[in-house]
Amino acid sequence: MERLFLYRLLKHSKWGFAFTIIFMLCYALTYYKKMDMIFFPYNSMYAIDFTKTESTTTYAMKINSVPVRITEKLYWKKDMLETSLNGYCRYLKNGKHVFLFDYVHYRFSNEQLQQWLLSNLTPVEKAVENWPAWYAAMAGYSIPGGATIEFVQYDLVLDKDRALLKDSIGIYKIIQP
């Protein structure tokens, strides 16, 4: 027990121990509420070199040709919406096929194990169909019946502290029943 970090911290500094326990409890609560990025708002702040000319790709969802805006959301919510939209659009571009499907078939030869892993680790078709409605609701929008939902890929060039639109492509379009 004397080798445990928290025990040694308690012996060294009661204030440090109390702060660490409070931080751990707050982090556990925010993690449970899916808000764990709240403590790290500047994750990639220094990861991009804006002095070079680079290109990037981003995605957007449109409801009846109106883009779903996420930029005014809290950082953790914007990050979650942006990350999940990127993942969903890459999933659509890949023909609703996930890499895990190929990996499981390559890695495991037992067909029962393959089916069990895939049924528990890959998206269920119903969840895939409901994802646009979930995304819109999280962003504060509702999708009326008969609405056209479109996913668009934007290719941008980062040049001299600005993002310039190079190209945009519609990657998927559905009509909400």
Image (spheres, helix red, strand yellow):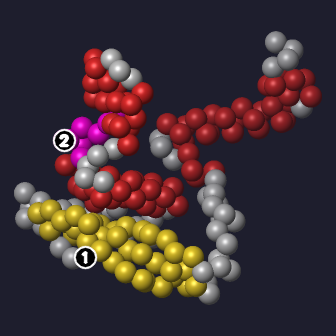
Asked whether the viewer can see residue 125, the reply is: yes
Q: Amino acid at mark 2?
A: Lys
Residue at numbered disc 1: 66
Position of 28 with respect to 65 (left or right) is: right
- Chain part drawn in magenta: 121-128
Position of 93 with respect to 15 (left or right) is: left
* Residue 171 spot, x, y in % from top left: 26, 66
User: From what the image shows, is residue 130 above or below residue 75?
Assistant: above
Q: Is residue 20 magenta?
A: no
Question: Residue shown at 64%/53% (left/top)?
Answer: 40
Disc number at residue 25? none
Identify the secondary structure beneath mark 2: helix
Residue with the most extreme right position: 12
Question: Residue shown at 18%/65% (left/top)?
Answer: 173
Position of 90 with respect to 83 (left or right) is: left
Comparing marks 2 and 1, which lies closer to the viewer?
2
Residue at numbered disc 2: 126
Q: Which quadrant would the N terminus be assigned to in this image?
A: top right
Q: CA distance from mark 2 to mark 1?
A: 25 Å
The first of marks 2 and 1 along the sequence is 1
Question: Residue shown at 12%/60% (left/top)?
Answer: 176
Residue with the most extreme top position: 1
User: From what the image shows, is residue 75 above or below residue 15?
Assistant: below
* Residue 167 spot, x, y in % from top left: 37, 81
* Majority SS type along the magenta span: helix
Question: Residue shown at 83%/36% (left/top)?
Answer: 16
* Residue 161 spot, x, y in % from top left: 61, 84
Quarter of image, res 61: bottom left
